[in-house]
Image (spheres, helix red, strand yellow):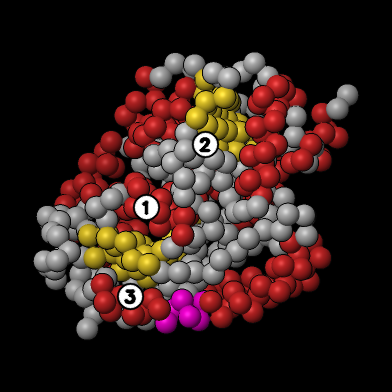
């Protein structure tokens, strides 16, 4: 089924076999990265001239 | 998990001391300024920057966003108080027919030149804004040699049309060369089991400055608050997005189909230059665009979502735990790969020629 041949009812029927998934991001990795830059790059915190 | 959270709160409270925000006409050099530059190919790059913006603000940073087009319009609507700077990038449109290869080849010199001009413009913006950290969401020219700069991408292995496969190695080397200009590269995916983006974000050799940061969705914080409050009262939510003219073409196809069925539906057209909202025959509600809280509510109420297989849309779907039908933008090899990969993993159904062959009895 190409985009132009999209059939809504057909897609709804077949999608019943696919249940998606659930993922949560507690932002810990992102905080780690920000922390890494903040501690390793002393210029971070003062604007360059 | 809670122990980790507590440990990190203690750690960050000592290193990243939150400071009060101040108006921009009264600059305070003690406040750390972060310049965030999302790519303007649709709004997907801007939407996934929302959790990054929120976290930096939580940690006491002042956030400035530099971008253009629909991307920057989206940020202005979502965060009206954030300072936005006009920072044009290269404009791209997709052909009406499925022949992207020639366009890709002819655009290459322009894309490379754009990286050069973008890099020069970024230096000026950093100088004028006083930013001390740059976050670039897939804008290759946004590194800075004097301050740390971060590149966000899920495309370490860029998918290219099959006739261009002989140039794949060269493209990969160029991609890695540019990624190495940055202090770090953040991959919005998780590492195990090839993650959500499969081979795109899991190459054989990961550059040393790359780090997986988990998926990024603008709905993450809303989900934590109240996902279970809404009953399923909507049959279908259609979220249109992506480059023209393919966005309009899919809209026309879907609207014709919805007119034939007795299902309650909402269509979010994904355009920012209109505020026109209306209802057709009392069952199909059309919105030009919706702000995140309202869109989240509709997502929570919907039994099924129909959308493009852009990576930001997929991250939103798994954050909200929705069932979905994915329709890749024709000729967009990355979207075609993602839709195929996630269908092979039995996560989302996709519409393409292979689907029909597979399911027809």
Identify the chain of the residue marked 3, using the numbered disc in the image: B
- For residue B125, the mark is 3
Q: Is residue B212 visible?
A: no
Identify the element where label 1 is drawn: helix
> Residue at the spot x=65%, y=32% of the render?
B255
> Residue at the spot x=21%, y=46% of the render?
B9
> Residue at the spot x=61%, y=77% of the render?
B110
The verdict on a common chain for dots 1 and 2 is yes
Identify the chain of the residue marked 2, using the numbered disc in the image: B
Q: Is residue B229 left or right of residue B158?
A: left
Mark 1–mark 2 distance (CA, rounded to whole Å): 17 Å
Q: Is residue B286 above or below residue A48?
A: above
What residue range appears in magenta? B115-120
Sort mark 3 into few (<14), some (14-19) or many (20+) by Cα contacts within 10 Å: some
The C terminus of chain B is located in which quarter? top right
Identify the element where label 2 is drawn: strand
Mark 3–mark 2 distance (CA, rounded to whole Å): 34 Å
Q: Which residue is mark 2?
A: B268
For the residues carrying marks 1 and 2, which lies nearer the camera in this image?
A: 2
Q: Position of residue B14 (x, y in %)?
A: 15, 56
Q: Position of residue B94 (x, y in %)?
A: 67, 58
Q: Position of residue B281 (x, y in %)?
A: 58, 19
- SS assignment for the magenta stretch, majority: helix
| Nearer-the-camera pick, B95 or B170 | B95
Residue B119 inside the magenta-drawn segment: yes
Q: Which residue is mark 1?
A: B75
| Nearer-the-camera pick, B89 or B225 | B89
| Nearer-the-camera pick, B300 or B253 | B253
């Amino acid at each position: 089924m190409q985009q132009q041949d999209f059939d809504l009812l057909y897609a709804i029927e077949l999608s019943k076999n696919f249940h998606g998934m659930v993922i949560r991001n507690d932002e810990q990795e992102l905080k780690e990265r920000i922390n890494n830059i903040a501690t390793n790059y002393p210029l971070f915190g003062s604007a360059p001239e | 998990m809670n122990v980790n959270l507590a440990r990190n709160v203690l750690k960050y409270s000592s290193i990243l001391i939150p400071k009060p925000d101040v108006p921009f006409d009264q600059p305070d050099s003690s406040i750390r300024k972060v310049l965030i530059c999302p790519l303007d190919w649709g709004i997907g790059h801007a939407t996934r920057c929302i959790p990054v913006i929120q976290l930096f603000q939580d940690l006491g940073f002042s956030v400035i966003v530099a971008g253009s087009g629909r991307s920057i319009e989206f940020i202005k609507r979502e965060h009206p108080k954030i300072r936005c700077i006009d920072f044009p990038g290269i404009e791209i449109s997709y052909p009406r027919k499925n022949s992207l290869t020639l366009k890709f080849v002819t655009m290459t010199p322009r894309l490379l030149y754009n990286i050069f001009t973008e890099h020069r413009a970024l230096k000026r913006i950093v100088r004028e804004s006083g930013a001390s950290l740059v976050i670039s969401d897939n804008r290759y020219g946004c590194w800075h040699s004097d301050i740390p700069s971060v590149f966000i991408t899920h495309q370490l292995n860029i998918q290219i049309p099959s006739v261009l496969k002989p140039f794949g190695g060269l493209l990969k080397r160029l991609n890695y060369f540019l990624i190495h200009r940055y202090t770090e590269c953040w991959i919005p995916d998780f590492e195990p089991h090839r993650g959500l983006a499969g081979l795109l974000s899991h190459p054989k050799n990961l550059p040393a400055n790359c780090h997986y940061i988990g998926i990024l969705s603008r709905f993450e914080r809303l989900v934590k608050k109240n996902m279970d409050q809404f009953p399923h009262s909507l049959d279908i939510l259609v979220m249109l997005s992506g480059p023209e003219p393919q966005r309009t073409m899919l809209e026309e196809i879907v609207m014709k189909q919805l007119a034939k069925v007795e299902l309650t539906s909402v269509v979010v057209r994904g355009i920012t230059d209109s505020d026109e909202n209306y209802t057709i025959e009392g069952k199909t509600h059309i919105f030009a665009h919706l702000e995140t809280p309202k869109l989240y509510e509709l997502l929570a109420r919907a039994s099924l979502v129909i959308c493009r297989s852009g990576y930001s849309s997929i991250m939103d779907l798994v954050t909200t735990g929705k069932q979905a039908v994915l329709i890749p933008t024709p000729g967009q090899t990355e979207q075609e790969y993602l839709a195929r990969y996630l269908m092979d993993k039995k996560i989302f159904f996709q519409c393409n020629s292979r689907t029909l062959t597979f399911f027809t009895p």
